[in-house]
Amino acid sequence: MKLILLGPPGAGKGTQAKMLTERFDIPQVSTGDILRAAVKEGTPMGVKAKSFMDAGGLVPDEVVVGIVHERLQKDDCVKGFILDGFPRTVPQADALKQTLAALDKNLDKVLSLEVDTEALIGRLTGRRTCRECGRGFHVTFDVPEVEGKCDSCAGELVQRDDDQEETIRKRLEVYGQQTMPLVDYYRGEGLLATVDGMLDIDVVQAEILSALRAS
Ligand code: ADP
Ligand code: ADP
Ligand code: ZN
């Protein structure tokens, strides 16, 4: 199963991707998680990416395209993968097409999670993220079993630097300008399935599974 999860910041891509990796035993490839790990390690790529991320902008296409190109060639992607947060621009989508063609792989589906802007802001301001594994929780919608600790790895839950209202608004604007065109892009390729992302987490998961069965 080779999937893309498309949708604005806060739509639930990471939450749904983590559930899908367990169900299908395929990796989640999150460019956001990979970039945050590079920032944490202080690698040259991380240092370069940090200023774009803190400002709520996009990291340059060539950087993320390179990350995904390498990642998809790893052994664990043989059975499939879930792309979360990539592609985010038309040039990234074009580059992905080339990478997949070179690897002789085809996408099965692009799932577009649709959520109202006001709900996105509430989700992102209340999001708490595991410092160790990147899993997301929410102060009211997805409360961890032990306060401040990740259910998966017991890592510390923190608020991401870019989950501040001003940066959130900037990220939503960037989404509308740079990423939203990909909905039509993938509709044109006959790969798009839209999913109502306003529903509860488990219901969204069920809708995704039914969209995948329909394909
Ligand atoms: P994305 O990866 O698209 O930015 P996340 O999966 O991190 O989004 O979700 C953003 C926030 O919203 C998290 O705090 C998460 O717990 C919460 N969330 C995810 N899906 C839902 C949902 N269906 N209903 C309510 N809150 C949700
Ligand atoms: P969210 O789903 O909440 O928007 P992500 O974790 O996917 O957040 O991304 C966080 C930040 O990392 C983005 O705001 C952007 O700066 C950078 N980033 C992640 N993926 C990409 C990408 N495909 N292209 C460019 N920048 C990216
Ligand atoms: Zn964790």
Image (tube, rainbow, N blue to C red):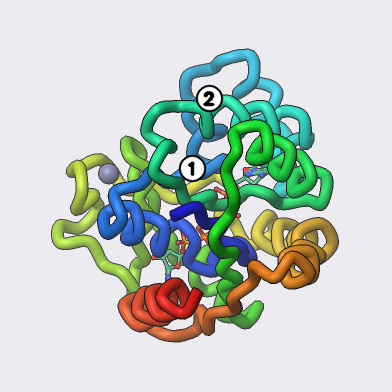
User: SS of the residue at dot 2?
Assistant: helix
Instruction: Kindly identify which residue carries mark 1.
Output: 29
Q: Is residue 126 above or below residue 88?
A: below
What's under tag 1, amino acid-wise? Val
Viewer-proximal residue, 37 or 145?
37
Q: How many marks?
A: 2
Question: Gap in Å between the C-alphas at discs 1 and 2?
Answer: 14 Å
Q: Is residue 38 left or right of 206 when viewed as pictured?
A: right
Q: Is residue 70 left or right of 214 when viewed as pictured?
A: right
Q: Residue at x 52, y 74 (%)?
A: 122
x and y percent of residue 168 in the render?
Answer: 65, 60
Q: Is residue 180 visible?
A: no
| Mark 1 crowd level (few <14, some 14–19, many ≥20, 10 Å Cα) | many
Instruction: Kindly identify which residue carries mark 2.
Output: 38
x and y percent of residue 53 in the render?
Answer: 67, 40
Q: Is residue 135 above or below residue 185?
A: above
